[in-house]
Image (cartoon, grey):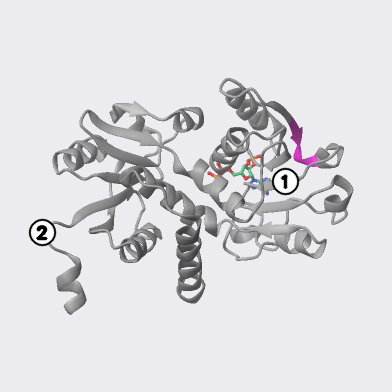
Amino acid sequence: MKDIFSRVKGTTSVFTVIGCPVKHSFSPVIHNTMALVTGRDFIYTAMEVQSDCVQGAIKGAYCLGIKGINVTVPHKVAVMDLLCDIDKKARVIGAVNTLKYTEDGYVGYNTDVIGAGYAIKNKGYEIKDKTVLLIGAGGAANACAVTACDEGCKKLIIANRTEDKAKRLAKNISAFYDCEIETVSMKDLNSVDSCELIINATTVGFGDKAGLSPIEDKSFYKAKGVEFVFDAIYTPWETQLLKDAGEQGVETLNGFSMLIYQAVAAEEIWFDEKYSKELQEELCEKLSKYFRENC
Ligand code: ATR
């Protein structure tokens, strides 16, 4: 009880995530843990907002002085019309997941891009000057493609089951980044000459596709010179892709740290302060333990 009385006071700010559905969101656990670890005086909630109420919700939140909002499915595009400014990375992706209160209104950001970059970098892997094979061309792939180009990869190869979608994504990214981008159909994956980093941003390996890998040929990793594999999936904790790559001596990382680091990036934007690598790693360790034991 004592904790509750000292935790929420008249000075306590409220941050929130809006979406529909949103009750499953892990963001309140992440940000409330971060508030405890950093000692900041805020709480973080989840609010279900229907599509016809997004405009009213954003206006109301602004009037209430809510300093930061995360936006999740299905409102990531709809909120863009309600903002006073939008950061470059969010404009490239065409979706916003973080709003910051300013005097002129909310400014929109996309921290999924930053989260993917932090996750890979904190594992000690540099994307700069590497050839990246990105598998997938949906929402998650869009963010990872921007991460790869923003971090200065040498070449980005986008592989997708539906190659037209990969081509569309490549065209969109090329309008913003001066990076060599190729596309390939998933069925022709073996035609890729070489790649050092593989990012899986498909749903292959998740849900009813658990146990499947987007790369069926286990000799692929050695044959193409793969050094690191990042899978945006984190349920299951180790996908078949990561298992196969790990068995071939390749370094691997699942998507849980991207989830944590996109939240870290949001707080850095809200509070105008960089979080140290040590703090980021402490949060990731605490939260991954909690997630694996409880979720
Ligand atoms: P998200 O927002 O999570 O990225 P999405 O936009 O629906 O989800 O994208 C899902 C991605 O997984 C797409 O790249 C999809 O390929 P298509 O564009 O061809 O649909 C890919 N995907 C889903 N099921 C797949 C499967 N069985 N085999 C290969 N790719 C698959």
Taking the spot 40% from the left edge, 36% from the top edge, the residue there is: 109
Q: Is residue 184 magenta?
A: yes
Q: Which mark is residue 197?
A: 1
Secondary structure type for disc 2: loop
Give the percent coordinates (x, y) of residue 266.
39, 46
In magenta, the rendered stretch is: 183-187
Left or right: 202 in relation to 55? right
- The quarter of the picture where the N terminus appears is bottom left
> In the depicted view, which residue is nearer to us: 10 or 66?
10
Query: Dividing the picture into quarters, in which one does residue 174 lie?
Result: top right
Examine the rendering and report whether any part of residue 212 can be seen.
no
Callout 2 amino acid: Gly
Callout 1 amino acid: Leu
> In the depicted view, which residue is nearer to us: 204 or 271?
271
Instruction: Tell me whether circle 1 and circle 2 mark residues in contact (CB < 8 Å).
Output: no
Left or right: 205 in relation to 20? right
Main SS type for the magenta part?
strand
Q: Quick check: 1 above or below 239? A: below
Left or right: 125 in relation to 54? right
Q: Is residue 132 magenta?
A: no
Ligand 1 falls in quadrant: top right
Taking the spot 28% from the left edge, 29% from the top edge, the residue there is: 82
Left or right: 154 in relation to 272? right
> In the depicted view, which residue is nearer to us: 9 or 95?
9
Q: Which mark is residue 10?
A: 2
